[in-house]
Image (cartoon, rainbow, N blue to C red):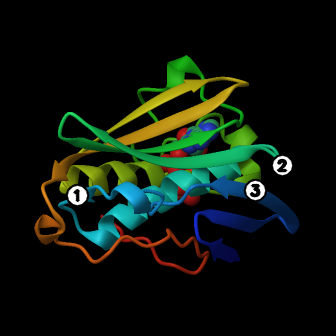
């Protein structure tokens, strides 16, 4: 269930019957006053961001904040998803984008994922000519940054106008 109100999203996720409320600050369109444009397919970018936000929510304790930010500079646009969750051990960092890789299945059993989300995300980002990077520390949280080439103007922008990222459980992820 998602309630999108301008730049804020309140996500109520059901995990194992337990409801979890996470406040998502800033949406993909949080650049209203100073628009930046990217030359990328809207659905593809939405899938990438959606997977990152889902992870941020799934791997964070209740009542922590998940922030989504957009910034630009040096001809690039960065989309950042920041959480205050359980973090990822250093030894796993270079494997999390592999298909089916999950850090210690015991700790993520609750969320019952398949380990495909980040592999799909990376694929989507690369499809759009971008890169993805991760910073994480156990017990502190994680930051995923998508970097894409900045387009000159709205005309350059192939995709439709930015809109708030919608997270819906029923939405189908494309399978590679
Ligand atoms: P799904 O296919 O449903 O997305 P998943 O979430 O397990 O399953 P990925 O999204 O690919 O798979 O993530 C891989 C693993 O990386 C996760 O199982 C989890 O251990 C770790 N991980 C990903 N994002 C985070 C995060 N924000 N905080 C902590 N751990 C994370
Ligand atoms: Mg996932």
At x 58% / y 63%, what residue is drawn? Answer: 7
Secondary structure state at the residue bearing disc 1: strand
Discs 1/2, front: 1
Give whichever of discs 3 and 1 has the lower sequence position.
3
Q: Quadrant of the C terminus?
A: bottom left
Residue 22 marker? 3
Can you see residue 97? no
Decide: is 112 above or below 70.
below
Residue 23 marker? none
Secondary structure state at the residue bearing disc 2: loop
At x 67% / y 75%, what residue is drawn? Answer: 2
Residue denoted by label 2: 62
Residue denoted by label 1: 38
- Front residue of 10 and 88: 10
At x 73% / y 49%, what residue is drawn? Answer: 109
Q: Is there CB contact under 8 Å for labels 2 and 3?
A: yes
Q: Distance between the residues labelled 1 and 2?
A: 33 Å
Which of the 4 quarters of the picture holds residue 141? Answer: top right
Q: Is there CB contact under 8 Å for labels 1 and 2?
A: no
Which of the 4 quarters of the picture holds residue 142? Answer: top right
Left/right of residue 162 with respect to residue 83 in the rendered view = left
- Front residue of 176 and 57: 57
Q: Residue lying furthest top in this view? A: 90
């Amino acid at each position: 269930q998602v309630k999108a109100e301008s730049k804020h999203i309140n996500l109520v996720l059901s995990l194992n019957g337990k409801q979890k409320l996470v406040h998502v600050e800033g949406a993909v369109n949080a650049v209203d006053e100073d628009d930046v444009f990217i030359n990328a397919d809207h659905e593809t970018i939405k899938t990438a961001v959606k997977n990152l936000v889902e992870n941020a929510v799934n791997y964070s304790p209740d009542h922590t904040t998940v922030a989504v930010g957009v910034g630009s500079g040096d001809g690039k646009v960065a989309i950042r998803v920041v959480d205050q969750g359980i973090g990822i051990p250093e030894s796993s960092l270079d494997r999390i984008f592999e298909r089916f890789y999950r850090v210690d299945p015991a700790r993520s059993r609750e969320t019952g994922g398949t380990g495909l989300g980040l592999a799909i995300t990376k694929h989507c980002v690369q499809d759009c000519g971008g890169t993805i990077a991760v910073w994480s520390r156990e017990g502190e949280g994680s930051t995923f940054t998508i970097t894409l080439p900045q387009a000159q103007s709205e005309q350059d922008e192939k995709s439709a106008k930015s809109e708030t990222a919608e997270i819906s459980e029923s939405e189908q992820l494309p399978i590679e």
